[in-house]
């Protein structure tokens, strides 16, 4: 009924379903590649959807890049998972990037974790290395690390060098934070005491993902190498968040973090506008639109602390289906920024800064002179579900009568 109450989302959902089936048909027959792509779907379903449109070589490289970064990074708080590399950053979601809090595996001391993190960029070349930890899909990924390593060793040298560089930087960054034996409730057992600490940590767990992808695009020969600052913003804007369960102060903290994320939006627009390859453009643009849409739905929303808050599947399907040009990106950023603007509470401590950043995003989008009217919204459907049910019942009766005749 939720789908039928928004007719404009039905066709995109059907297309999304077809695309999901196509992913399974793309899985190569070789054991190591079959394992890598199967695990990618299990631990990062939404990422698997956007990656399928890339060319075979780049698709392979980006998939292995993503799987490897699960292991030293492990940033999302998936409650049932604990691992040697763990640090806590964010709420779990359908992407399932495999992490939890170091607090969840107190039997593994920092003296064991830190050397593994620092040396992980060397282990990726060793088919015989693995470290058993975690549960379910994440334990399987670690136990069969040799298969991911085998796939990695079949990539071109440029791809291998890019992945090695990012795993080295990320492992060192994670080791740095684990070495700080300071426990705080917010962001769990990490020594994240200031905004600067938070931004630095986010750089390691998200910004470096942007660095890595930019280097892979460049290694593939289709894109110029983007600046580190723009690549960093592309990663940071995809950051997930984890919040304390309280009321007014929690919402203000939430709004502060969303406002912080918005500071990267203009860099993201600049990065995407410079992309040349259409498949790479869509691969980058769809998650960025999902990111600002998530900011819009989370901003000033106390329900974030009471349950799962995310964009509905039909709207996600529309974003995937309708994102093909920079005009589509500018339109989505403009509309979701406008939704954030409509929710700004003047009593919020960051209200003026939030409004300033939203205005800057909207000006950038308007200056493109290419805005469309998409009508993206996050509210309940204007169509009455009961009325739709009655209409469907009448249609069924009419069809039954025709069939009877």
Image (tube, grey):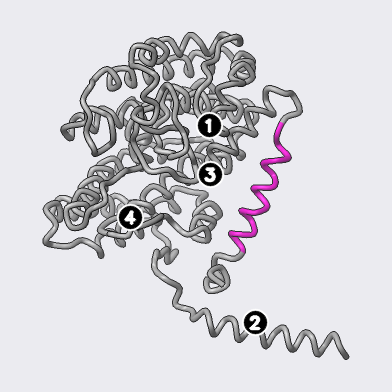
Q: CA distance from mark 2 to mark 3?
A: 31 Å
Crowd tier of the residue under label 4, counting other residues whose Cα lies within 10 Å: few below 14, some 14–19, many 20 or above: many
Q: Which residue is mark 1?
A: 135
Q: Which residue is mark 4?
A: 304
- Disc nearer the start of the sequence (2/3): 3
Residue that appears at 39% across and 58% down: 371
Q: Which residue is mark 2?
A: 392
Rendered image: mark on residue 46:
3
Q: CA distance from mark 4 to mark 1?
A: 27 Å
Q: Which of pointers 3 and 1 indicates the residue nearer the eye?
A: 1
- Disc nearer the start of the sequence (2/1): 1
**In the depicted view, which residue is nearer to us: 374 or 401?**
401
Q: Position of residue 26 (x, y in %)?
A: 70, 36
- Disc nearer the start of the sequence (3/4): 3
Q: Position of residue 310 (x, y in %)?
A: 42, 55
- Disc nearer the start of the sequence (4/1): 1
Q: Position of residue 380 (x, y in %)?
A: 42, 71
**In the depicted view, which residue is nearer to us: 312 or 355?**
312
For the N terminus, give its image quadrant: bottom right
| The residue stretch that appears in magenta | 11-27
Residue that appears at 21% across and 25% down: 182
């Amino acid at each position: 009924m939720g789908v039928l109450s928004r007719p404009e989302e039905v066709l995109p959902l059907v297309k999304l379903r077809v695309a999901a089936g196509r992913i399974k048909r793309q899985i190569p027959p070789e054991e190591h590649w079959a394992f890598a792509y199967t695990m990618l779907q299990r631990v990062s379903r939404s990422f698997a959807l956007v990656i399928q449109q890339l060319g075979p070589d780049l698709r392979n490289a980006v998939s292995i890049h993503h799987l490897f970064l699960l292991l030293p990074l492990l940033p999302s708080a998936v409650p049932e998972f604990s691992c040697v590399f763990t640090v806590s950053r964010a709420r779990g979601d359908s992407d399932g990037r495999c992490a939890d809090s170091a607090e969840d595996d107190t039997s593994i001391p920092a003296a064991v974790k830190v050397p593994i993190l620092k040396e992980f960029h060397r282990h990726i070349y060793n088919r015989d290395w693995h470290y058993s930890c975690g549960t379910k899909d994440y334990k399987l990924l670690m136990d069969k690390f040799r298969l991911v390593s085998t796939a990695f060793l079949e990539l071109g040298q440029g791809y291998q060098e890019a992945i090695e560089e990012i795993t080295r930087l990320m492992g060192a960054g994670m080791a740095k934070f684990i070495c700080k034996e300071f426990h705080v409730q917010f962001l769990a057992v990490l020594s994240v005491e200031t905004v600067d600490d938070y931004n630095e940590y986010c750089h390691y767990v998200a910004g470096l993902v942007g660095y890595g992808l930019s280097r892979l695009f460049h290694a593939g020969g289709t894109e110029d190498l983007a600046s580190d600052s723009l690549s960093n913003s592309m990663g940071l804007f995809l950051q997930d968040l984890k919040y304390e369960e309280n009321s007014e102060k929690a919402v203000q903290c939430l709004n502060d973090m969303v406002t912080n994320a918005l500071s990267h939006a203009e860099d993201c627009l600049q990065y995407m506008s410079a992309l040349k390859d259409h498949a790479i453009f869509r691969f980058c643009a769809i998650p960025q639109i999902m990111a600002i849409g998530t900011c819009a739905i989370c901003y000033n929303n106390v329900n974030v602390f009471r349950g799962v808050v995310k964009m509905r599947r039909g709207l996600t399907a529309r974003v995937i289906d309708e994102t093909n040009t920079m005009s589509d990106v500018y339109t989505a950023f403009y509309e979701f920024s406008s939704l954030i603007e409509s929710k700004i509470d003047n009593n919020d401590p960051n209200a003026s800064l939030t409004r300033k950043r939203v205005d800057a995003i909207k000006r950038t989008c308007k200056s493109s002179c290419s805005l469309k009217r998409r009508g993206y919204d996050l509210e309940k459907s204007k169509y009455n579900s009961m009325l739709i049910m009655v209409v469907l019942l009448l249609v069924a009766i009419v069809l039954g009568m025709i069939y009877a005749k």
